[in-house]
Image: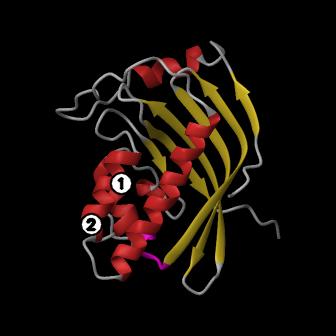
């Protein structure tokens, strides 16, 4: 079982001003409907946040393995974007690791799909990050912040390729819990660690 090194803050009301924009997104997906309400009113826990992060890791590896096996990786990737991200319900702020210039930020599902699987002429610099030969993915958190139906994590993701080489990426995730109880990513900021000369 992987150990998570993290400081945890559970806050009530401190982030209310910051989160106001999250609860009423400036851009809403066309024909989007909110998920059906969940039974009960269970509190969001660090364990549930960890589960959502591990699900993201597992999904990335699943796309890579499906591609390597000659399977329908495009359908798999589309399901990941619907299940792990909030694109179908509202705005997602996505700044992938290997993007630059005018296409640095991806605010819609099409742009996110292009980054993960490539093949979109609108995004000619995208080779498909999820199509690399990833066979493993793990994460550590430096901090987890929970406020109501929102959770924020900051730490590292470690990706292992088929040759055993591990790549570390700095990650910031913000999750929003839907009425169905599922956590979906609303902010994904990713960068390679800074290396001073």
Left or right of residue 48: residue 176: left
Left or right of residue 130: residue 136: right
Q: Residue at x 54, y 60 (%)?
A: 97
- Residue 20, compared with residue 181, is above or below; it is above
Q: Residue at x 56, y 71 (%)?
A: 136
Extreme residue in the left direction: 31
- Give the colouring mode of the picture: secondary structure
Q: What range is drawn magenta here?
A: 129-133
Disc number for residue 124: none
Extreme residue in the top direction: 13
Q: Main secondary structure of the magenta part?
A: helix
Q: In the image, is residue 130 part of the stretch drawn in magenta?
A: yes
Locate residue 111: give its quadrant: bottom left
Disc 2 marks which residue? 74
- Residue 150, image x and y in percent? 53, 28
Q: Residue at x 31, y 33 (%)?
A: 89
State the SS at label 1. Answer: helix
State the SS at label 2. Answer: helix
Disc 1 marks which residue? 80
Dot 1 crowding, Cα within 10 Å, few <14, some 14–19, many 20+: some
Q: Quadrant of the C terminus?
A: bottom right
Left or right of residue 32: residue 41: right
- Residue 64, image x and y in percent? 42, 73
């Amino acid at each position: 079982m992987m150990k998570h090194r993290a400081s945890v803050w559970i806050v009530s009301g401190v982030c209310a001003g910051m989160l106001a924009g999250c609860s009423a997104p400036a851009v809403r997906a066309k024909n989007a409907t909110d998920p059906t309400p969940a039974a009960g009113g269970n509190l969001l826990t660090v364990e549930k946040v960890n589960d959502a992060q591990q699900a993201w890791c597992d999904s990335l590896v699943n796309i890579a393995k499906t591609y390597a096996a000659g399977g329908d990786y495009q359908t798999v990737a589309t399901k990941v974007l619907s299940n792990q991200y909030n694109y179908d319900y509202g705005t997602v702020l996505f700044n992938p690791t290997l993007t630059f210039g005018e296409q640095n930020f991806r605010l819609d599902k099409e742009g996110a799909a292009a980054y993960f699987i490539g093949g979109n002429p609108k995004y000619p610099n995208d080779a498909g990050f999820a199509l690399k030969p990833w066979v493993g993915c793990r994460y550590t958190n430096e901090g987890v912040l929970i406020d109501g139906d929102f959770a924020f994590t900051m730490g590292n993701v470690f990706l292992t390729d088929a040759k055993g080489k591990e790549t570390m990426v700095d990650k910031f995730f913000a999750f929003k819990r839907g009425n169905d109880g599922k956590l979906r990513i609303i902010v994904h900021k990713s960068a390679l660690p800074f290396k001073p000369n």
